[in-house]
Image (cartoon, rainbow, N blue to C red):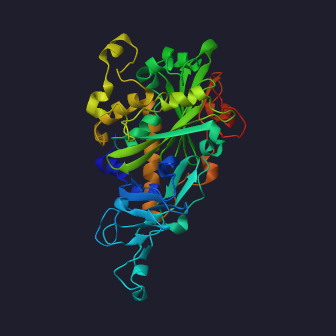
Amino acid sequence: MLRKEQNDLLTQTGPGTPMGDVFRRYWIPALLAEEVAEPGGAPVRIKLLGERLLAFRNSEGKLGLIDEFCAHRGVSLWFGRNEDCGLRCPYHGWKYDVTGQCTEVPSEPESSGFRQKIKLTAYPLVERGHILWTYMGPPDLQPPLPEWEFITVRPEQTFSSKRIQESNWLQAMEGGIDSAHVSFLHRGALNSDPLFKGARGNQYNLNDSAPVFEVVEHGSGLYIGARRNAEDGHYYWRITPWVMPCFTMVPPRGDHPIHGHFWIPIDDENCWAWSFDYHPVRDLTEREVQAMRDGHGIHVTYVPGTYRPAANKDNDYLMDRAAQKAGTTYSGVSGIAMQDASLQESMGPIVDRTRENLTSTDNGIIMARFRLMKAARALRDKGIAPPGTRPEEQQVRSAAVVLPPDQAFKDAAREALQAQPGVAQASV
């Protein structure tokens, strides 16, 4: 378990907090490119790391991410007019460009130089892989652009979505590296979800509900291996990579696409759950993409006009007790993503980790917390940059393999855990 001050250190990500400073050293996903697609289109509100921001694409197509509020009297610039390479506040006409610089103050003479002194907080916003990424840290320490495999394959090979999760980012992320729950919570979906069914590995999950965990550190995070029994004395290994601070991948199943997540804090009590699917050697099929749009696999359907899941705490996640009793769904909640989210949200906005009773299956979670705390303190106390910001540290994959009992997964699956263009995933 954690002490309260440790839990606070890990869960608080607003401006000036140690963990917030860690997050601000990375490029993080901010919006889907489709949300800000039109030059001169409507601005979009976005809250990240406790900061209320506004994204827009100016009339020339340049992207901007700036403070939501006008520097004059605090009006939300969401009401602004996107015109002539800038966003104009409708209250008194102050205008800002994509860098946050005020370019016009109609009430003041240009000769006064007043408008040059006004500049909103602004962050870079770049498009890679259908996603708009931002960096919110010190400009002189900006790392190279992200190079995750799912955003560097051809567009036809990848699909991404996002949803709001009404909990702190850490309990969501910890679910992403917890392989033990698959044998219970998701057992009804393994042989029915179109993006999971048919894989031989599903039966290993269903037949062995007591996995043995081995966790191996790598330079930018962890490889979390969950070992289950297979045929002839062999072991089925599901290997989950975690890259600091919040990137996780789900071990693949058969020839289904690989998938994973980013868990991005909105504020301390809500986060964005980003979900991606991609296949390293082929295009996604129309059936696969449609299944993703229909909320299968790790994706969801939405309340119309929002990114809030259609199944949410206000409707008890559309709980179906009859399906639970029949075993169609183990928890009574439908869909992989919402099975996870419903239980994580049930913990409360920020789970009290002083009350936990952890076991050996939680070793990955324990080690991830330690790495995060170590990085936050090193940055706060010594100015040491956190790991995982360099492109070469992002070239990871999850893997699912069957190995003889005398082979350690860290050695036998070493190549399978590295992203290799044109090479298929290691999957069972």
Q: Based on the displayed image, in which of its 4 quarters is residue 235 positioned?
A: top right
Residue at far right of view:
422
In the shown orientation, is residue 90 left or right of residue 197? Answer: left
Looking at this view, is 131 or 150 the one in front? Answer: 131
Quick check: 378 left or right of 143?
Answer: left
- Counting from the top left corner in percent of width and height, residue 426 is at 65, 29
Q: Position of residue 60 (x, y in %)?
A: 55, 63
**107 vs 102, nearest the viewer:** 107
The reply to whether residue 181 is visible in this rendering is yes
Q: Quadrant of residue 238?
A: top right
Q: Indicate the position of residue 174 as horizontal and vertical percent values.
A: 42, 38
Kindly identify the residue that appears in the image at 53 percent across and 29 percent down: 290
Of 235 and 83, nearer the camera is 83
Asked if one can make out residue 27 in the rendered structure from this viewpoint, the answer is no
Q: From the viewer's perspective, is 203 left or right of 362? A: right
Residue pictured at 52% horizontal, 27% vertical: 291
Is the C terminus in the top left, top right, bottom left or bottom right quadrant? top right
Task: Specify the quadrant of the image occupied by residue 110.
Answer: bottom left
Q: How many marks?
A: 0
Q: Residue at x 45, y 32 (%)?
A: 178
Residue positioned most to the bottom? 111
- Residue 277: x and y in percent read 56, 35
Which quarter of the rendered picture does the N terminus lie within? Answer: top left
